[in-house]
Structure formats: structure tokens, C-alpha cells
């Protein structure tokens, strides 16, 4: 039976404690709907993202180009890695993921469940650069492994590692280091080495997925919203009426059960008729209940949007804990999803951001700045780091040098005699001697900085490493 473990645990708890002991006597209908919306938000947003991308199940879509200022489809585009995306459907059985040798390039294969938790991350940090095969199974997997003696299976499966997904739908985001090559053919070959195979039904899938609108009658209302709008997924969810939102959420839980630690919120939302494994008909509840749920959903959406989940350290917004693995921090999880769906584990990469200088003033392109790393405080990493400038809207800044970021592997940065490092942020050259350390900014107006640190060392994660100051020159 689907979701059996969660249901059994919930029944046991209800029998011993009584429902009022779990949810508290003061929980109102409004409170329950409000908390349920925050709990459900990442899953509904993830589904909207999947429908927007139009990638067929169990196929990779590889992005082949490096972002430039003309790219306006995403904000804060990453020029350090190329992306490959896939959506797995484990309802029909396990999927075999093949990861190629990456020849020393940094890479990360992030596997997220529909709640946006990262449950596995094969990559440079965890599995090395030799590649391998990973058998991904769903929450209802019966424990049977494929018969390696079956010739139909033996021809495409070797030694594999087992990964169990908490949900039947899985989002895979692969990041592969671009390096300093002008010809990306080697990197494209690495991307083509990522393969997905349905166990028991090995077929020749294309190396590059062919995009096609997803047709799923279970999510017709959400699909129609996407087709009739040019908005991005967070905007679509913000415009979604409460009935469609909660009906979509209930439908998603049929294939994607709650985590085992979620039983208190599962008990709560059952009081408004939402239960794992069952559909929900919003219009079957009384009108006054509908009105209360609508108001709670509106207020919860507003609260998610105003959350600032990143602590501020020396004027940088910097998250080193809980990102990508949220436990029961549902509001934090929802806020992260709203700001940037698909956050990875900090052990794999961290992205401090700022638009404030050392005097607590907004960064302004009409001024000259220096980013100063003290001796021994250059970002400690097992791989590499980069610094990227964006305009106030989050897009890359056009400049004559076509230099949009500085990368510790791609650029030969010049150190000061004492071992410190200065990076110059200004719209005009600091002079030939220091041009290797020059990162152009807009001629005027606010700009933002993102410092990306890949496979950071312990000092970054525990706070002993100090972020650089950004000061006017």
C-alpha cells in the first residue's frame, strides 16, 4: 500500500495521544490551512517548474551554451558550470543513472525529491571523477534487485550503487565545470555520457531530450495556467487560487508521500480533508470553510515572499546550514524554494551574495571598489571559486572585454606581495598591471555580487573563514 509507513505511524500516534494532543487545542481552521500551504508550497512549485520545462520523463536535457548578457530566461545565470536536467518517474520501476568519467572536472549530480530535499549528490566530493552507475528506486520499491545474469540487463548494467528516493518523482540537476577551454566539445561529451535507463525495459533514449508539452489530465488546471501565461513558476503559484493549489498538492501526494518526520503536519491537514494518497475536492467543503482557506493561503503566500532565509555576515547573505536538507523547517524550505528552487547542499557549493559595501552603502557602478582577500583568506576550496557581477535585475553586465566573472581556475589572478588578493570592481580599467584582477561593473546604478565556492573546505562551512570586504577605492 502506498505511503504505508507514514499511515501506520500516524494511526499509532493518534491512538496513543489523541488528535487534540498532537495538533493542540488552539489550532484553528485558519492556522491549519496556513501551515498546510507553507508545507505544500515547494512541492506545488516543483511541479509547476517541471511542467514549464517540457522535458520528457527519464531523459536528460543538456544546456550547451555559456550564459551571456543577452540571456534573460533566468536571473543570476551561472558561467562556471553547464547544466543538464532530468525528471525521473519511478512509478514503473527503478531507473539506472550512468555518470561518465569527468577527467578531473568538478561536477555535481544533485537528486531532489518533490519536497526539494537533496537526498543524494554523486559528484566530485562524494564519488570522485571516475563515474559510475546508480540504481534509483522509489518509496514503494519491493527490495528486488535486477537480475544481473539476464542478458537484456547485463548488457547495460555493471556494478551499481543503490539510491532510494523518498518520492516517485525526482528532479536531477547536473552541474559540470566549464573550465577555460574555448572549444566545449569535451564538456559536451561528458554531458552526453549521462544516461538514464528503465530497468526491465532498456531502450535507446536520445542523448538530448526533445522538448514537448507534458499532457497529464491530473494537473490540467496548472497546465492551462502555464500555457496561458508567460510568468515564471513562482509568479504562477502566487496567482493560483487556493482550490487549485490544494487539489494539486493532494494529487501530487498520491505518488510522492510525506517524509516520516512530517506526521504532525499530516495530522493537521487531515482536519481540512487533505490526506496523503487521496484526492481532495475543494468545492465539496462548506463555503465558509473555503473562504477561510482562501484567506489563509493568501496570507501564507505573502509571508513566504517576505522571508529572508539567509543570515547576513559582513554584509553578505550567506547560508551554510540546512540548505538542501530541511527537516521540519517548512517556512525556511518554502522561502528557499521561492528565492531559488533547487538549492544544493552547502558541502557541495555555497553562493554568498551582496549589494552592500563595507560602509553599508549600496554598490553603485559610478564608483570604484576593491574586493580585498586578506593573506590566507582566499576562498578555501577543494575545487575552485568565482566572483560574478549582475545588474540590479540579476542579469550579466555587458562590457567591451566580455568579462562577466573571475574564476580561480580560468583567470590568472595577480596576488599582492603579502599574499593578499585584490579584485577591482569598476566600469573602466584599473590599468594594464591590474587588468587580470578587473571585473567590470555597470557605468551607473546598483549592481550585485555573487561569490561561488565549489566544494568548500571546512572553514567556509563552520564560519572560521572570513568573507572579503567590498570597499570604495
Image: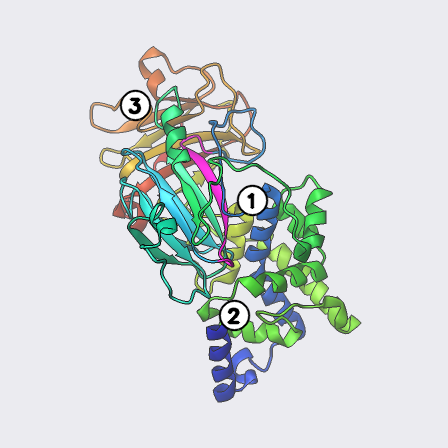
Quarter holding the C terminus is top left
Residue 473 vs 19, above or below: the answer is above
Q: CA distance from mark 2 to mark 3?
A: 55 Å
**Mark 1 packing: few (<14 Cα in 10 Å), some, or many (20+)?**
many
Residue holding disc 2: 2
Query: Magenta segment range?
Result: 78-92
Residues packed near mark 3 inside 10 Å, few (<14), some (14 to 19) or many (20 plus):
some
**356 lies left or right of 35:** left
Q: Nearer the viewer, mark 1 or mark 3?
A: 1
Separation (CA) of disc 1 from disc 3 = 43 Å
Q: Can you say whether 372 is above or below 294 in the image?
A: above
Give residue 240's mark: none
Checking the image for residue 413, the label placed there is: 3
**Viewer-proximal residue among 333 and 112:** 112
Q: Of label 2 and label 1, which has the lower sequence position?
A: 2
Where residue 276 sits in the image (x, y, percent)? 57, 70
Q: Position of residue 286 (x, y in %)?
A: 77, 74
Q: Secondary structure at mark 2?
A: loop
Amino acid at each position: 500500500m502506498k505511503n504505508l509507513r507514514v499511515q501506520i505511524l500516524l494511526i499509532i500516534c493518534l491512538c496513543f495521544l489523541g488528535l487534540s494532543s498532537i495538533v493542540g487545542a488552539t489550532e484553528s481552521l485558519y492556522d491549519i490551512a496556513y501551515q498546510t500551504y507553507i508545507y505544500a508550497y515547494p512541492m506545488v512549485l516543483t511541479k509547476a517548474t517541471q511542467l514549464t520545462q517540457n522535458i520528457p520523463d527519464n531523459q536528460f536535457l543538456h544546456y550547451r551554451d555559456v550564459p551571456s548578457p543577452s540571456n534573460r530566461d533566468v536571473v543570476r545565470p551561472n558561467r562556471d558550470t553547464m547544466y543538464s536536467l532530468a525528471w525521473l518517474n519511478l512509478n514503473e520501476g527503478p531507473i539506472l543513472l550512468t555518470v561518465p568519467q569527468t577527467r578531473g572536472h568538478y561536477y555535481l549530480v544533485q537528486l531532489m525529491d518533490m519536497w526539494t530535499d537533496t537526498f543524494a549528490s554523486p559528484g566530485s566530493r562524494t564519488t570522485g571523477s571516475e563515474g559510475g552507475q546508480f540504481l534509483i528506486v522509489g518509496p514503494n520499491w519491493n527490495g528486488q534487485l535486477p537480475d544481473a545474469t539476464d542478458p537484456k540487463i547485463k548488457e547495460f548494467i555493471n556494478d551499481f550503487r543503490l539510491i532510494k528516493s523518498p518520492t516517485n518523482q525526482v528532479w536531477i540537476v547536473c552541474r559540470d565545470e566549464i573550465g577555460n577551454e574555448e572549444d566545449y566539445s569535451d564538456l559536451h561529451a561528458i554531458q552526453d555520457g549521462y544516461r538514464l535507463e528503465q530497468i526491465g525495459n532498456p531502450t535507446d533514449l536520445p542523448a538530448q531530450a526533445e522538448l514537448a508539452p507534458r499532457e497529464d489530465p491530473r494537473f490540467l488546471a496548472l497546465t492551462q495556467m502555464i500555457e496561458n501565461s508567460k510568468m515564471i513558476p513562482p509568479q504562477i503559484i502566487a496567482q493560483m487560487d487556493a482550490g487549485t493549489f490544494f487539489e494539486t498538492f493532494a494529487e501530487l501526494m498520491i505518488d510522492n508521500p510525506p517524509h516520516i518526520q512530517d506526521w504532525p503536519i499530516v495530522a493537521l491537514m487531515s482536519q481540512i480533508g487533505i490526506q496523503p494518497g487521496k484526492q481532495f475536492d475543494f468545492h465539496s467543503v462548506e463555503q465558509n470553510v473555503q473562504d477561510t482557506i482562501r484567506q489563509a493561503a493568501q496570507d501564507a503566500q505573502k509571508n513566504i515572499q517576505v522571508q529572508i532565509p539567509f543570515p547576513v555576515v559582513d554584509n553578505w547573505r550567506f547560508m551554510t546550514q540546512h540548505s538542501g536538507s530541511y527537516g521540519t523547517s517548512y517556512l525556511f524550505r518554502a522561502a528557499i524554494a521561492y528565492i531559488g528552487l533547487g538549492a544544493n547542499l552547502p558541502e557541495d557549493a555555497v553562493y554568498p551574495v551582496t549589494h552592500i559595501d563595507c560602509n553599508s552603502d549600496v554598490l553603485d557602478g559610478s564608483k570604484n571598489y576593491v574586493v580585498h582577500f586578506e593573506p590566507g583568506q582566499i576562498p578555501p576550496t577543494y575545487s575552485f571559486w568565482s566572483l560574478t557581477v549582475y545588474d540590479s535585475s540579476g542579469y550579466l553586465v555587458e562590457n567591451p572585454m566580455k568579462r562577466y566573472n573571475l574564476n580561480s581556475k580560468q583567470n590568472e589572478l595577480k596576488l599582492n606581495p603579502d599574499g593578499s588578493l585584490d579584485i577591482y570592481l569598476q566600469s573602466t580599467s584599473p590599468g594594464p598591471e591590474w587588468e587580470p584582477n578587473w571585473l567590470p561593473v555597470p557605468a551607473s546604478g546598483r549592481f550585485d555580487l555573487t561569490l561561488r565556492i565549489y566544494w568548500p573546505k571546512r572553514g567556509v562551512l563552520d564560519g572560521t573563514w572570513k568573507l572579503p570586504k567590498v570597499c570604495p577605492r
